[in-house]
Amino acid sequence: MSKDYIVLAINPGSTSTKIAIFNGKHAVFTKTISHSAEEIAQFNKIADQYHFRAELIENLLKEEEIELKSIDVIVGRGGLLRPIPSGTYKVNEKMIEELRQAKYGEHASNLGAIIASDLGKRLGIPSYIVDPVVVDEMEPLARISGMPEIPRKSIFHALNQKAVARKAARELGKKYEEINLIVIHLGGGVSIGAHKKGRVVDVNNALNGDGPFSPERSGSLPAGQLVQMCFSGNYSEKENLKKLKGNGGLNAYLGTADGTEIEKMINSGDKKAELIYNAMAYQIAKEIGSLGAALSGQIDGIILTGGLAYSNILIERISGYIKSIGRIFVYPGENEIEALRDAAIRVLDKKEIPGEYKN
Amino acid sequence: MEKILAINPGSTSTKIALYDGEEEVWTEKISYKKDKINEFDSIIDQLDMRKSDIDALLKEKNVLPQDLDAVVGRGGPFKPLESGTYIVNDSLINDIKGGNVQAEHISNIGALLANDIAQKAGISSYFVDPVSVDEFEPVARISGIPEIERKSLVHALNVKATAYKEAKRVSKPLDELNLIVAHLGGGISICPVKSGKIVDTNNANEGGPFSPERAGSLPSSSLAKLCFSGKFSYKEIKKRIVGNGGLSAYLGTNNMQEVVKRVKSGDNKAALIFDAMVYQIAKEIGAMATVLFGKIDSILLTGGMAAEEFLVNAIKERISFLAPVVVYPGENEMESLVMGVLRVLRKEENVKEY
């Protein structure tokens, strides 16, 4: 039997910080600290939120009477780094430097490594990140867009996608590395990945506006019409980008990105809400179908996950379109915090050798 | 049999064909130098020149307007319309002359040229399945932001004609079939055709797979940033999306035969870009398969590039799991125009009013 390690897992999202203390696999406590829009708005850059969030975490640990010295390892969600293969990485100076400078872009998950590193150093324990959004296993042909100036990039909900893919593999009684899966993460953004024998060979880049529209994002738009809009003089760059990410998708059409709220609207007879929700299901289904072709139809399972996978109406609509493609698994919510825990334990148990983030 | 004259104005030519029933009697092309075309400010201004050249050709061919049963012109990007064969009427003529169309395109005058000859003989003139055929279901119109609507602009003439051919081949009425038709030309249209209706399409100028000349779908935020970068003018970016996008942008040629030649001679870059195009075409077909809930009778590959076996085989490899793939090479515009009119003259289909 391996020792039961005490693991601190930190998952910073755009409007919340989720943290958990595990004793082995067992959760001692899990808590999501919400941050109001006003609190977040005080900061210009994501990295500036570091002290604010770190303090909240330490206060919470104190409240929960967690002895800091008892913690064996800290694991944080990874952020926007250079493209790297899937896996667990040791937090190092180079990584922290790049995340502080937002070298590869601003994203709340950038804080995961920064917070883990600082606390880890003080406690003299190791800190790691796992499957950051920049996990890149894309095949060369999937990188071509249609315009050389804009290559397609692999940026997606890698942590949750990898975790649920492994879970489905277990349910199928097969190795993740032996099967083909399509994983759909239904969150504020929607990422849909083709997992071919353990590698995500294609995925829509939800961050840069690729794929279906989602609760907060526009997804792909008719290119010429978008260019016209950009050059119309009606919007600044910031306004235009906000319409694509943040205020796009469900938010733009219905004024809310909340699936529960929209289900209520539909159930009370709101035809517009129904049309828009159906359109989102339609676009998600089309993206799934496109990856079905990317895998030449060899698909062992289709996994619907993320917060919106709790929405029965959405799951029902999507399933209707795609059930001929393959067996459907629904794993609502995200398993990110558990995925972080599992990776940390794998490393401490020496079942996985952590990667070194280098040039 | 029915004598039908078909007129198809292109940017630097007018194609004319005479048909006797389904049989082609002759096809001719009146060509124009680019400089000559550039003398005109607008498309409509070319009308008289093109008219008199057609009249001269008919005289030379000894075809009298009164010998004809019908005249058909290619339709243009008119207002959104149901699929079908339409009679040219005053309302259409006014819309074309008044610029009440979705875009300025030479095909807009096809109906006017057809009408001119028909009037001399007191017969009807028609247009068939213009690019503005719109049979989208409501869900297909939603993009992802309210400011932009997904539009149906599609190679409808060839898509529909090809669907009719397939219906004939399997001896079933078109409205009992679910098809995916992929028109593979300079632009690519991929359409789920549900009981004869084009319920969705990528809109070749705006999205979908990249094609010999067009960029297809691009990540929207990346594209918006490029627009605001100050590095490109509006015109330059538009040109990179339609005209110099896709194969042209990566390989400097829009000629599929040339690309295939390079691939076969071991050019790695050409092979990568070729594979990527095949991949994107297959993905779009896969996407449209879900629109039909996976119930697909057959997938039809058509258009000029469908004559390229190397390409067709590569696409087939990725999509044949979905349904049988049938290849109908060529663009077949003249024939498709005539067939549309024949369906109406033979009362197999009702003529539509614009």
Image (cartoon, coloured by chain):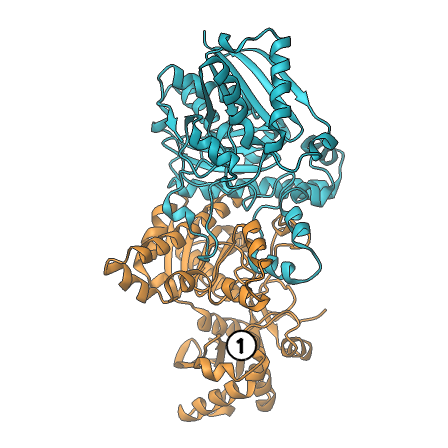
Chain colours: A orange, B cyan
Q: x, y percentage for residue B149?
A: 46, 51
Residue B309's x, y, as percent?
A: 62, 27
Measured as percent of width and height from the top left, residue A157 is found at 51, 64
Quadrant the C terminus of chain A occupies: bottom right
Horizontal side of A104 relative to A245 (left or right) equals right
Q: Residue at x 46, y 75 (%)?
A: A1
Three-letter residue code for mark 1: Gly
Front residue of B297/A220: it is A220
The answer to whether residue A236 is above or below residue B49 is below
Residue placed most toward the observer, B153 or A14:
B153
- From this view, report whether residue B42 is shown above or below residue A257: above
Instruction: Give whichever of B214, A177 is nearer the camera.
Output: B214
Q: Quadrant of residue A355?
A: bottom right
Residue extending furthest toward the left: A268
Would you say residue A332 is visible in this rendering? no
Q: Residues within 10 Å of mark 1 (few under 14, many from 20)?
A: many
| Residue found at x 69% / y 77% | A94
Q: Is residue B234 above or below residue B188?
A: below
Q: Nearer the viewer, residue A215 or B129?
A: B129
Residue B79 coordinates in the image, percent (x, y): 45, 39
Q: Secondary structure at mark 1?
A: strand
Q: Which residue is tagged 1?
A: A76
